[in-house]
Image (cartoon, coloured by chain):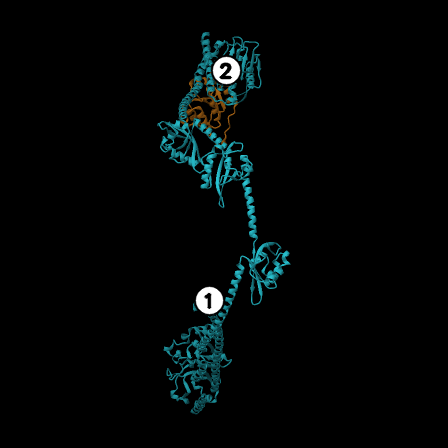
Chain colours: A orange, B cyan
Amino acid sequence: MKNKVILLVEDNPDDEELTLHAFEKIKINNTIVVTRNGAEALDYLFGTGAYAGRDPRDLPLVVLLDLKLPKIDGLEVLRRIRANEETQLLPVVLLTSSNEEEDRLKGYMLGANSYVRKPVDFDEFVRAASQLGLYWILLNEPPPPCPDCKKR
Amino acid sequence: MNGKFFSSNKDQQYWPIIRQFILIWALLTLALAIALWSVYKTQEKSMLAYIRDEQRQTIKAGSQFIVEELQELHDDLFYLRDKPALYNWLDQESSVNRANLNADWVTFVKYRKRYDGIVFLDEKGQERVRVDRAQGLPVVVPERELQDKSQVYFVEQTLALDRDSVYISPFDLAIEQDKIEQPIKPVIRFGTPVFDKNGQKRGIILLNYWGQRLIEQFRAISQQSIGSLWLLNNEGYWLTGADPEKEWGFMYPDRKGTRFADDYAEAWASIIEHPERQQFMANGDLFTYSEILPKTLFGDILENVVSGDERWLLIARVPDEKLLTQNVLQARLLAFIALSLLSGVVSWFIAHYRTRRQQVEEEVSDSEARFRNLVESAPDAIIIVNGEGRIVLANAQAEKWFGYARSELLNQPIELLVPERFRTHHPDYRQAYIENPVVRAMGVGRDLYGRRKDGSEFPVELNLSPLETKKEKLVTSIIRDISIRKHAEEELRASEARFRGLLESAPDAIVIVNDKGCIVLVNAQAELWFGYSRDELLNQPIELLVPEQFRTRHQDYRQVYTENPQVRPMGVGLDLSGRRKDGSEFPVEINLSPLKIGQDLFIISIIRDITVRKRAEQMQREAQAKYQELVNNLRVGVYRHSPTSTGCFLEVNPAIVEMFEAESAEQLQTYPVNDLCRDQGCWREFVHKVRQKGYIDNEEVPLVTLKGREFFASITAVIKKDSTGNTYFDGIIEDISERKEIERRIQQLNTALRDRAMVLESVNHELEAFSYSVSHDLRAPLRAVDGFSRILLDEYAGRLDDTGRDRLKRIRAAAQRMALLIDDLLKLSRITRSELKRGDIDLSLIATEVIDDLRKQEPSRAVQCIIQPGLIVWGDGRLLHIVLDNLLGNAWKFTGKRADARIEFGMEMQNDEPVYFVRDNGAGFDMAYAEKLFGAFQRLHGTEEFPGTGIGLATAQRIIHKHGGRIWAESKVEQGATFYFTLEARENL
């Protein structure tokens, strides 16, 4: 389980750096794959485009998804993840600056597992990242393979 | 009448006799015809029966003859066969034996006339011995003339037979040397085989029957019969018949078509189809028939007989002309004619006497009927009485009046019809009259009465006259019922009383004057109205009742009327008055009518008090004037219009005249309304709509005034019907040009408003997009600033001095404050955008929750909180929560430095309006800055002193404004502050 990948979808290099730093600070050893936009994230998950040949059945442990992304925005990425048989149960955490109620509502309606606002205060940010890591990497049990779920 | 009858022409006189004669004669002739016809029919029937019987007898005789004639042959044939002479010869054909045989046979033929010859043929068919008959005598045929007959059919047939069998040949003609012998020789051959002593068949013996003998006998029977009797063979060829040419047809090749069936097809068909019918009619002929089977000629040895003919047919025919007894019929006809002529003569005499007797009878009864008619139709009752006083005649009128049926009256004493009180004396009067009979009225000077059957009486007038016949003296009394006349007199008296009643009860005053002008009659109403009693008025001049100033003139008028009296109202066009006894006057209406009784002229005046009517008319006039004034003063146009599209206004009020800028109502009423339309034909359309619907409300029609000014009119119309059935419109017209103009302006404003709302909407959209960006994008850089500053402080702290570290900390604080500001700003804008979702909200409950939250955040603080319970308002609960969050949050914050902190939430009434407040005893503020209090980012305290972004109160104000309320504050520095707010009440929405 420890070798499982965490997929971070983040277009802002500052935020990426800070997030990785926070994970590093709390000693999370899992590989963190970073994709810079929604299209790339989907390519990674479905083994297409630049990630052609990757086994799509090898799913990440959790996806940390920013909402505001170039090309395909976060909500659309979430929608496609849920629409795909392989990834429909994949845990997705929306990690974003926005605190708009509308965003929250849409996120949950599309099946987000969690919605976390990135605090401006870095200390709080580190706290939030550590709680996220603890919870999704160590505490949470990912869904088992489910052949019957394919035809939903 | 009699004279007239005889003077008419003779034809007419005899016509009834002729009619009678024709009737009687026709009947007699018919009877005669029926009688003769039935006699004839009976005769015909019995004759036919006789013929039928005779025919059957003939057939029977013929048949019997043939059978008896041929029966013998069997024995003769066997006699010849069994004779020793034949056997001897067969045994030994010596000339002696042959001579014996010949002699034997010659003797046989000589005495047996029915045979024509005998032949013996040997088994090869060769004639061996033969005896013929020539010219009536037997002749032995010489041996050299004997022929070989082996090919002849009857030889062949007979040779084939067994012992004791007989062959009977067909009845045909003898053929010699292949030719029919002439003259013809009808023959039937009988043959049988011959065996010798040894039982050896040696040949045959043939016996020829002389057919002519049978045929002649048969013809003899036929001639004795009524019809003809014929013999036919099985194929229907004639053996004997009517025509010798047709006989023996089967023997002659050229006569093959001469069969019975060819002449009588129907009869032949009947024989073939119905052999059981021994007698039948065919084509009007009577046929009788029978058959003879040659096989049965010899009794019961059928199996030993072979016959060439299966049967012979005996047919007797009686032609129809023999059946119809023509002569008889003719004789009958002659008899009929003679008898009918005779009956004609008899009929004439009968008719003549009958007619004359009838005529005489008719004349008698005619005259009697006329008399009776006269009596019956008389309008008076007529009763004839004989010398004993008994009724011998009574007419219908007598029956009717006295109520007796005629039978009840006849032979009764006349006293039956006299009232009982006069009965005793009546016979004496009667006797006296009989002795001195003259035509006179009975009981002159007395009232006479008749008595009805029911006992009632009625007044009568009676005339008597004597009537002397050969037999006796009679008295005729003619009686007249005079009860109707009496009744009429009473009627008159009653009518007079009725008239007086009518006069007195009339609602009008009635005064009758004579030609001198003197009152001769007044009724009760006249007394009442004029105040005089009847006695005071009678014989007074009529002028007494006329107002004084008119009296003289009235006399002249009266004079004129008397010269030309007619029914008419008096003083047409004048207001007439009557004068009462007390001198007062009252309006009247008077009708005059002349009344002529004999030579005297009277004038009837019928006077009516019209005071009440006059008053009513006055009131009506006043009411009308009032309504007219009302209509004239109305500011809206009121009109009446003819119901045609081309018509004009019938009536208008001044408002319409002004509206159309006309000089007068009369001028306007000459213009067809169609000409006052701005759009051509608008009025025609309007009128059409009204006619369809019956009314129209507020139809907007553009019109023009007479001076050409255009204006918009709102027209109402409704169809009405006056008492004579003519229709018209009533309605009102209003000039709505001003209203239209205002409407147009409102529309303009609405359009502008709509445009502005659209701009506002797009601005709002942009603002939303902006807010979203702010929320997401402005925060990211701040996080980078804070995050990297923190990393620097953590990981590079060793390389920085205290100042550097402090600067980094300031960078971080500034970034975090900026994030806070952004969040508050977003909150504010979100409130501005969000829509109110109102409901009943318990403000007290919300305040309690907020305080509880604050206590949880700072459990160390001791603050006295007073919350007025049960403050329910109409608003958006989420937003009001924010308001109290801010206000109570501020109160909590600004009392932070006081140990005896106190926060109060409640409501008080100001100017009848609930005002909610949050009061504290905190730091307070200087009222000089109260204006700035609710501006965004405005702060009255330093951040160090009391933290905050300056957005809270701006947010609260915006929410209160959204709720249609106001918010304000009162405070003094260090003496606490009170924030007041109001909310729009529910009813105001």
Between A16 and A105, the one lying in front of the other is A105
Tag 1 and tag 2, C-beta contact below 8 Å? no
What amino acid type should be assigned to the residue bearing mark 2? Ile
Q: Please tell me which of labels 1 and 2 falls first in the chain.
A: 1
Image-quadrant location for residue B133: bottom left
Subunit of label 1:
B
Vertical side of B636 occupied by B523: above or below: below
Residue B941 in view: no
| Outermost residue, left side | B708
Q: Is residue B346 visible?
A: yes
Q: Are marks 1 and 2 on the same chain?
A: yes
Give the secondary structure at mark 1: helix
Q: Residue B255's spot in the image, x, y percent? A: 38, 77
Amino acid under disc 1: Gly
Q: Residues within 10 Å of mark 2 (few under 14, many from 20)?
A: many
Observer-nearest residue: B872 or B142?
B872
Expressed as whole percent of the image width and height from the top left, the position of residue B272 reads 45, 73
Position of residue B667 relative to residue B908, above or below, is below
Position in image of residue B521 (x %, y %): 53, 40
Question: In the image, which is nearer the foreground, mark 1 or mark 2?
Answer: 1
What secondary structure is found at the residue carrying circle 2? strand
**Label number found at residue B3:** 1
Quarter assignment of residue B720: top left
Q: The residue marked by circle 2 belongs to what chain?
A: B
Q: Nearer the viewer, residue B969 or B451?
A: B451
Q: Residue furthest bottom?
A: B96
Query: In this image, B708 relative to B79: left or right?
Result: left
Q: Nearer the viewer, residue B385 or B810?
A: B385
Residue B229 in the image: above or below residue B470: below
Q: Which residue is mark 2?
A: B967
Q: Relative to residue B404, is residue B988 drawn left or right? A: left
